[in-house]
């Protein structure tokens, strides 16, 4: 949480915020508070999925186990791509902060592109696994692997959609108006999704072999 | 529009008509929607329980078949937990939170409407199941593998989706409440000046935020097992049904505090008002609430003492369960301390609050006996457990919420509820409640199992079961008195005025019902119980001295001020049909998931509706034209 928000929260001694009817006001701290809370909720969501995976990592039934299906170099590469997208997200935020909208647009698109590349890699990986005999219904290992990584992929996809939406909004000059989406918030979300992937990559892929 | 006007405007809550309710984003109306929904579901859930009691009133009951019995006890539990007590918490929080902290609305009014409609469709989904092949019948807890076994019958699919919906609605509402409490308090309203009800709402919101995603994952797993061939809970394929119990109770135990904390908050507002004393040990009550929030995540396995976890885990969870009784006990002593030496007025809200304390103590004590593993092993799955959780959730939470209804009904409607009917309601409910549930302690200790649709003669269970059924009839009568009181008072109750109880908190400074924008001027808060300090001070001996109403100082008391030309510009959110549209789209699309493969067409249509709703939501302006007071 940003310092300003924390200070507001602790002292209660702050200017009027939204809803107090004092004309225009900065909704950013309010939205950021809500986003942090939402991400807290997401932590528990992925925590439960990861716990399930850890319980079932060896429950391979008659199907293949991690060592037989995982392609570590490939997934390392796609993980690196997703990590880089956090960097471009920071650059997009920075450019937007300086109101350099051309730059901001470039970095927004780059972030979305890197996210989409990661997703393409995931789709490729999933098809490979299915061909090698690991599907949702092969074993509890398969079920929990696909549920965990699938839900993460869904989060990346939603992030890509939001990035594209912000790109379109910036073309209409609506990116920084009070009501619209906000680069900072989407940035928070995006970094969170990246961090979750780092955990997944470590726990699911690296610790197996 | 002024606070101190004697004339009461009962229509000051904005436009009327069905459409205005479907599209409302006003936190007060959304609160009323939650409350009315809860009342309707309370009647339905109560009828379900009544049939269960009829079936059990004697040996070899013939009122219900085993199948119907399973559906009714499952839906009774689901209804009372998710569609009555939880929405009651949301109702009071929605209505009161912004007013009590001096704000005009919650942080995200349209998200708030969306939360309500997602809740609404969650309830609809659960009850749709009855229409398409019977209600959910695997218990509200839906233990795997039973809940994944019979996939030809879609009952437990509706259960999984309905609960998922209710969870999503609650997470959205909680994020909204937390952001509102943390960032939108009136100037001077520091955290430690907030009403205890708001503190409890804050803790509850955090509990929801952190516990619901856990059961959300479990519900996805069950739904995938049922529909997409995953093997999470299929034991012959190395799936582990105990995982469900852990995920469910990691949510399920915090859930009991989600149900009780808002009621504790209400009681903490009612007792000081009717004792004419501040809450005894405010900070202890607050920190005890926070402690309950943290500890609530560390006790879940006390629901699983018979599952063979081993002595170390059992000892650990037994200890943590005993420890969580400490903050709860602190609160009870603080409430008693509040009434101690007070000038007590036994109005209906006060009676229900005192009833809450007494019943909750009984339920709490029987709860501590569950912490003792050998005793719990005997009590497990017996009627003793049924007695325990009804004492905390009915005798506790529901008594607290009913106290809240009597206390704030004048604020909601501008009219008082009948005290005579209120007292009838209280004594009938108290008597009926104890007649119904006290005998269940004995039945449980005599070995009567839960969730069993009939029992043979000669086990000595007939007498107490007969008493319990009689008691449930008394509860039903008390419910009728309550509903009659609500309907009658809504139309013909005495005019309340802004401050009928001589209240202490900000909601009593504005008209009843409040204007759409709550406050003409944002109040400036100088004390805990600020309104009380505007009305009273203490002399040297500690006796109350009434203050002359002064103008100036805190804006809220001053009534119609001459603003001259400087009239206040009020920005309020505009009504929107996109929240209900988005929620409807999500509901349609999830129904499609049950009926795959053809159902995917329904899912696609639903997704389109949802996207339409979300897209429209994103691009429409959120505020209407400003107006002036
Ligand atoms: Cu528990």
Image (cartoon, helix red, strand yellow):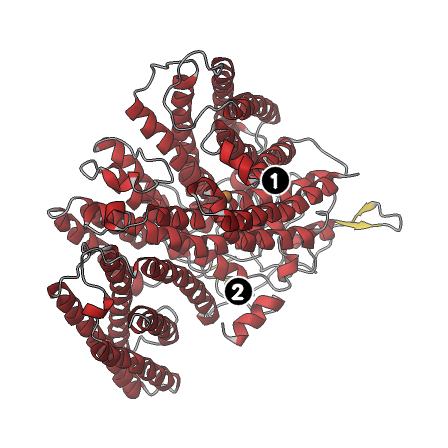
Q: Nearer the viewer, residue A83 or B192?
A: A83
Q: Which mark is residue B183?
A: 2
Query: x, y percentage for residue B581?
Result: 27, 51
Decide if ligand 1 comes within 8 Å of the CB at mark 1. no
Against B14, residue B448 (above or below) is above
For label 1, the residue is B497
Against A140, residue B14 (above or below) is above
Dot 2 or dot 1: first in sequence order is 2
Query: x, y percentage for residue B43?
Result: 41, 28
Direction from residue A177 to residue B494 in the image, left or right: right
| Residue for point 31% across, 23% down | B66
Mark 1 residue element: loop
Q: Is residue B158 visible?
A: no
Parent chain of label 2: B
All told, the count of numbered labels is 2
Q: Is residue B343 visible?
A: yes
Parent chain of label 1: B
Mark 2 residue element: helix
* Label 2, label 1: how far apart the Cα atoms are: 30 Å
Residue B171 sits in which quadrant?
bottom left
- Mark 1 nearby-residue class (10 Å; few <14, some 14–19, many ≥20): many
Q: Nearer the viewer, residue A7 or B171?
A: B171
| Residue for point 37% across, 44% down | B21
Residue occupying the far top of the picture: B458
């Amino acid at each position: 949480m940003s310092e300003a928000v924390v200070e507001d929260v602790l002292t209660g001694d702050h200017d009027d915020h939204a809803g107090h009817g004092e004309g225009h006001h900065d909704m950013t701290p309010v939205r950021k508070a809500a986003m942090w809370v939402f991400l807290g909720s997401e932590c528990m969501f992925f925590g439960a999925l990861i716990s399930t995976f850890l319980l079932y990592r060896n429950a391979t039934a008659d199907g293949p186990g991690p060592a037989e299906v995982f392609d570590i170099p490939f997934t390392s590469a796609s993980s690196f791509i997703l990590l880089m997208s956090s960097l471009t997200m920071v650059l997009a935020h920075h450019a937007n902060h300086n109101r350099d909208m051309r730059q901001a647009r470039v970095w927004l698109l780059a972030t979305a592109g890197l996210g989409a590349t990661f997703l393409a890699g995931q789709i490729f990986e999933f098809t490979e696994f299915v061909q090698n005999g690991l599907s949702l219904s092969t074993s509890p290992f398969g079920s929990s692997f696909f549920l965990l990584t699938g839900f993460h992929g869904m989060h990346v996809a939603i992030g890509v959609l939001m990035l594209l939406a912000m790109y379109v909004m910036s073309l209409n000059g609506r990116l920084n108006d009070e009501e619209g989406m906000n680069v900072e918030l989407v940035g928070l979300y995006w970094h969170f999704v990246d961090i979750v992937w780092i955990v997944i990559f470590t726990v699911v892929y690296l610790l197996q072999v | 529009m002024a606070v101190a006007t004697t004339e009461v405007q009962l229509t000051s809550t904005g436009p009327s008509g069905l459409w205005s309710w479907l599209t409302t984003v006003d936190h007060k109306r959304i609160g009323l929607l939650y409350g009315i929904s809860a009342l309707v579901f309370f009647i339905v859930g109560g009828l379900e329980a009544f049939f269960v009691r009829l079936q059990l009133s004697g040996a070899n009951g013939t009122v219900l078949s085993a199948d119907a019995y399973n559906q009714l006890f499952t839906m009774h539990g689901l209804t009372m937990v998710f569609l009555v007590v939880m929405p009651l918490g949301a109702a009071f929080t929605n209505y009161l939170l912004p007013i009590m902290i001096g704000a005009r609305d919650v942080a995200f009014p349209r998200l708030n409407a969306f939360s309500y409609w997602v809740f609404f469709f969650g309830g609809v989904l659960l009850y749709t199941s009855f229409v398409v092949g019977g209600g959910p019948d695997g218990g509200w807890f839906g233990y795997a593998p039973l809940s994944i076994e019979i996939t030809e019958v879609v009952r437990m699919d509706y259960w999984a989706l309905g609960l998922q919906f209710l969870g999503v609605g609650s997470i959205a509402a909680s994020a909204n409440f937390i952001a509102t409490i943390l960032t939108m308090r009136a100037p001077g309203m520091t955290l430690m000046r907030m009403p205890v009800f708001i503190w409890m709402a804050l803790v509850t919101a955090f509990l929801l935020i952190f516990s619901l995603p856990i059961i959300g994952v479990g519900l996805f797993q069950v739904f995938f097992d049922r529909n997409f061939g995953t093997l999470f809970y299929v034991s012959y394929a190395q799936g582990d049904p105990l995982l469900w119990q852990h995920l469910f109770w990691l949510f399920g135990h915090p859930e009991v505090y989600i149900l009780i904390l808002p009621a504790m908050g209400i009681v903490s507002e009612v007792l000081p008002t009717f004792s004419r004393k501040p809450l005894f040990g405010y900070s202890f009550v607050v920190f005890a609430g926070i402690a309950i929030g943290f500890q609530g995540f560390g006790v879940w396995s006390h629901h699983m003492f018979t599952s063979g976890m081993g002595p170390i885990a059992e000892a650990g969870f037994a200890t943590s369960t005993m420890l969580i009784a400490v903050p709860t006990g602190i609160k009870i002593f603080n409430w008693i301390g509040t009434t101690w030496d007070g000038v007590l007025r036994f109005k209906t809200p006060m009676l229900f609050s005192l009833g809450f304390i007494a019943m909750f103590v009984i339920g709490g004590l029987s709860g501590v006996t569950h912490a003792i593993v050998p005793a719990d092993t005997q009590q497990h799955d017996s009627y003793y457990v049924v007695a325990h959780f009804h004492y905390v959730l009915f005798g506790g939470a529901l008594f607290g919420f009913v106290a809240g209804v009597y206390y704030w009904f004048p604020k909601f409607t501008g009219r008082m509820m009948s005290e005579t009917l209120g007292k009838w309601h209280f004594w009938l409910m108290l008597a009926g409640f104890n007649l119904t549930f006290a005998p269940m302690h004995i039945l449980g200790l005599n070995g009567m199992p839960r969730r069993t649709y009939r029992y043979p003669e000669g086990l000595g269970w007939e007498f107490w079961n007969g008493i319990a059924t009689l008691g449930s009839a008394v509860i039903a009568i008390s419910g009728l008195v309550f509903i009659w009181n609500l309907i009658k008072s809504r139309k013909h109750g005495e005019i309340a005025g802004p401050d009928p109880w001589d209240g202490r908190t900000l909601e009593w400074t504005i008209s009843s019902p409040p204007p759409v924008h709550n406050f003409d001027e944002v109040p400036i808060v100088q004390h805990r119980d600020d309104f009380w300090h505007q009305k009273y001070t203490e002399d040297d001996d500690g006796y109350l001295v009434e203050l002359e109403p002064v103008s100036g100082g805190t804006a809220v008391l001053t009534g119609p001020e001459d603003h001259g030309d400087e009239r206040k510009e009020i920005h309020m959110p505009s009504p929107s049909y996109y929240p209900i549209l988005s929620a409807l789209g999500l509901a349609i699309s999830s129904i499609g998931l049950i009926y795959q493969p053809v159902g995917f067409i329904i899912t696609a249509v639903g997704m389109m509706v949802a996207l339409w709703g979300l897209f429209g939501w994103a691009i429409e302006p959120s505020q209407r034209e400003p107006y002036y007071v």
